[in-house]
Amino acid sequence: MDWLERTAKLRQWSRNGTRAPHKPLLLLYALGRFQEDADGALRYSTVEEDLHRLLAEYGPPRKTTPAYPFHHLVSDGVWEVHTDRGPGSPGSGVRDLREAGAAGRLAPDLRAALRREPPLLGRIARLLLDLHFPPSLHGELCESVGLELEPTESERLSTVRRQRDRQMRERVLTAYEYRCAFCGYDGRIGAVPVGLEAAHVRWWAFGGPDDVENGLCLCSLHHKLFDKGVLGVGWGSPRSSEAESGGGHRILVSQRFVGHSPAAREHVTALAGRPLVGPQPGVRPVAAAHRDWHTSQVFHGEPRPVTAATPLQS
């Protein structure tokens, strides 16, 4: 049985690029627990809080429940559920799972395969990460689910048909003249830029292309906050000259973000409503379709109202 192919084909609710990472998150969590206890089961009432936290932090902005993947992952052949009454899931309702004493774990054949071939666990985990989350979140997501993976894994996975364009980073950083589009940071050591990254607006895992219209040059801090939905990109009412330079785009800051320190105010909340540092003349800014996808699928909650803020100089 090809477990990588089965992992790549997890059935998920999908419509117009909507994120539904419920099953991948549960499977990553189960792999992490398998490393701790290969025979242990995950009682829903015990792990519900952990799964809620994962969905809140790495799932879609809309409200959701961990009961959904706990029940439905069974149909993908990688997960099994037992209750106090015997095998089989009682349903996808939270009350159903709690009252029946539902407990889940990796399917028997998958557990046997992981015992026979220990590197398979890392390959499955990396495939899930690559298919459903941006690289900036991989490390902390592994920590969140208790996964310990090898630092590097260079083998090519046949189930991932799209290959990333290695020139994407250089094209995006050049387009933005090696400055963070949110704060203007442009640090270097000698001639080498440091702390600057090319962020996909529409995530590569969700069909985002490797081109400049889907990219932003961001410092490491703002890249992470952008991928976590703290920061976003909106559209103001630009003058024609602003539109040509990308100045029509404005920075969104989530109302759910809380930070009381001067650093949090300066580097995050004070950005609300500021114009982006646009790309150099002749380069098209972020495409509306990619911007709108990020706003609906990644950005959390409503944006903070614009306060009197000093625009960044571009």
Image (cartoon, rainbow, N blue to C red):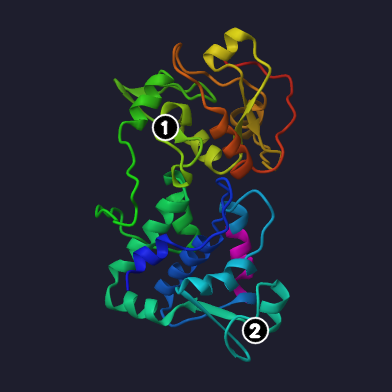
Could you say whether the residue bearing mark 1 is in a helix, strand or loop?
strand
Quadrant of the rendered image containing residue 173: top left
The region drawn magenta spans 46-54
Viewed as shown, does residue 205 lie left or right of 60? left
| Horizontal and vertical percent position of residue 93 | 70, 72
Q: CA distance from mark 2 to mark 1?
A: 46 Å
Residue displayed at 42% across by 36% down: 209
Residue displayed at 59% across by 12% down: 242
Q: Is residue 52 magenta?
A: yes
Callout 1, which amino acid?
A: Ala
Locate the N terminus by quadrant.
bottom left
Decide if residue 313 is in sight here.
Answer: no
Crowding at dot 2, Cα within 10 Å, few <14 / some 14-19 / many 20+, comes out as some
Viewed as shown, does residue 38 lie left or right of 84? left
Query: Mark 1 sits on what residue?
Result: 198
Predominant SS along the magenta part: helix
Residue displayed at 67% across by 41% down: 257
**Which numbered disc, 2 or 1, marks the residue that appears first in the sequence?**
2
- Up-down relation of residue 24 to residue 253 (above or below): below
Query: Mark 2 sits on what residue?
Result: 101
Q: Pick whichever, 72 or 36, lies toward us.
A: 72
| Horizontal and vertical percent position of residue 16 | 57, 45
Residue furthest front in the image: 15
